[in-house]
Amino acid sequence: MRKLPRKAPAGITPARYEAFMLLLEMENSSHAHADELLRRPRLSELSTLDRNLCTTLVMGTLRWQLHIDSAIRTLLSKPNARLDSAIQIALRLGTFQLHYLDRIPAHAAISESVNLAKIAGHQHASRMVNAVLRRIAERPRPASLPSSPSPEQLAEATAHPLWLVERWAANYGLEQARAICEHGQQQPELSLRLESREAEAELAVNGMQLAPGAILTDARRILNGDVTATEAFQSGRVRIQEEGSQLIAELSGGVTPLPRRILDCCAAPGGKTLILAELNPQAQITACEINLARLEALKARISASPYATRIEVRQADAAEPEEIDSYDLVLADVPCSGTGTLGRNPEIRHRLQPADLVRHHERQCAILHGALRASTGRVIYSTCSLEPEENSAVVAEVLAQSPGWRQIPVSEVIKKLQKEGRLTSQGSERLKNAVAPDGSLTLLPGSLGPEAPTDGFFIAVLEKQK
């Protein structure tokens, strides 16, 4: 494939070109994530309309990719042939626009996809792109989901891997599996973390329309406006952070009274670290990250915050703590499959394999063991996964090998936060209902209702017995 120009060439709109470039990068790298790529500074050069369309194209194409690829294969002369990645992306983008967007003229979707193939150096293949997309345009749009679908029908209708749908149906029931899948096909709300009411007033002056958080009193949901263009965002006084992610930090911050030393084991990108610093002004915090690129981003974020003097950032392996029995509070928000975030990170469904859950489990157990060794009091274990192997199974295995530690109910912390006014009244009730018999908290995507569309996550609190 020839080297592609930085900016959209003639015949291709900036939104489609940037979407093509991002999807191509993700196709060729297993480490690229859509939500991170869509925040790249170069996208700020686009108009608001183009930036919104680019986001829609990238996220929608990834969400419906299994459907899209199936439709494309049936129209190829060699259905099992491996297409060049640029041609594959051009076809996916065109098909997504034709079958899933109502306001895109068919001629625009087809002609610009053909031009993308040409720009990538595939003049001959561009004719195939044109022919396939014209036939796609003549086909009826995909059928809607039946009222009582089987796992196979649910996976097909919502473009999710069957093995994941079958797992969710077995673990949570078919109706909840349906809610998870439907949540995964929707554009997630953007939530903000406020550091002051003054910042909220400033956003209002700048034309931002906000709604209260569904769970947390310090969270806000964005209804309208571009928060990234405001000075409050650029100075770090408001941050984009999913409300479930904020909740993990809030629950962590409420676990131990007045901790003096806090360890955040897997701290990047730093949103939870900053909330811990905000909630515990008396504490010194150590934020660890093993990945060098993520470490540098974490350092930059922490150094620009008002808490920089109280947070030490280290490159360290959380499974091998540098200090033993040194921290009053440890947060182990571990790397995981991310199956609770498929609406925000739809690429995960195309990369994850069943064997990955075994690998994650082993690493998560190692990190939790390290967290227990570092702590003198309490440890919070959390993931954004829906899979028991990464959640309750990790806690059970590590506790069985750790005499002197026990699990305590998250409901105790919920009551404390409710008393302090940190939870909304509806949010506290929803959370109490989500606490499992073993005391852990599992929120499934869509489980709190349409008023609280959080990602899925798991949290457990462990205590060292005196």
Image (cartoon, rainbow, N blue to C red):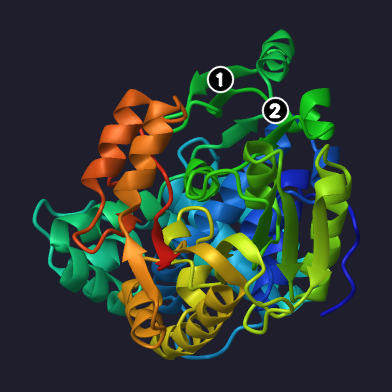
Q: Position of residue 375 (x, y in %)?
A: 58, 69
Q: Where is residue 242 in the image (x, y as percent from the top left)?
A: 54, 44
Give 424 or 408, whichever is nearer the viewer.
408
Q: In which quarter of the image is the C terminus?
A: bottom left
Q: Position of residue 64 (x, y in %)?
A: 44, 60
* Badge number at residue 210: 1
Identity of the amino acid at label 1?
Leu
| Residue at image location 48% in from the left, 51% down from the top | 98
The single residue placed furthest to the left in the displayed view is: 148
Give 396 or 378, whichever is nearer the viewer.
378
- Tag 1's secondary structure? strand
Total of numbered circles in the picture? Answer: 2
* Badge number at residue 226: 2
Is residue 113 shown to the viewer in this render?
Answer: no
Give 42 or 117, whichever is nearer the viewer.
42
| 316 up-or-down from 228: above or below | below
| Residue at image location 82% in from the left, 59% down from the top | 312
Identity of the amino acid at label 2?
Asp
The single residue placed furthest to the top in the displayed view is: 205
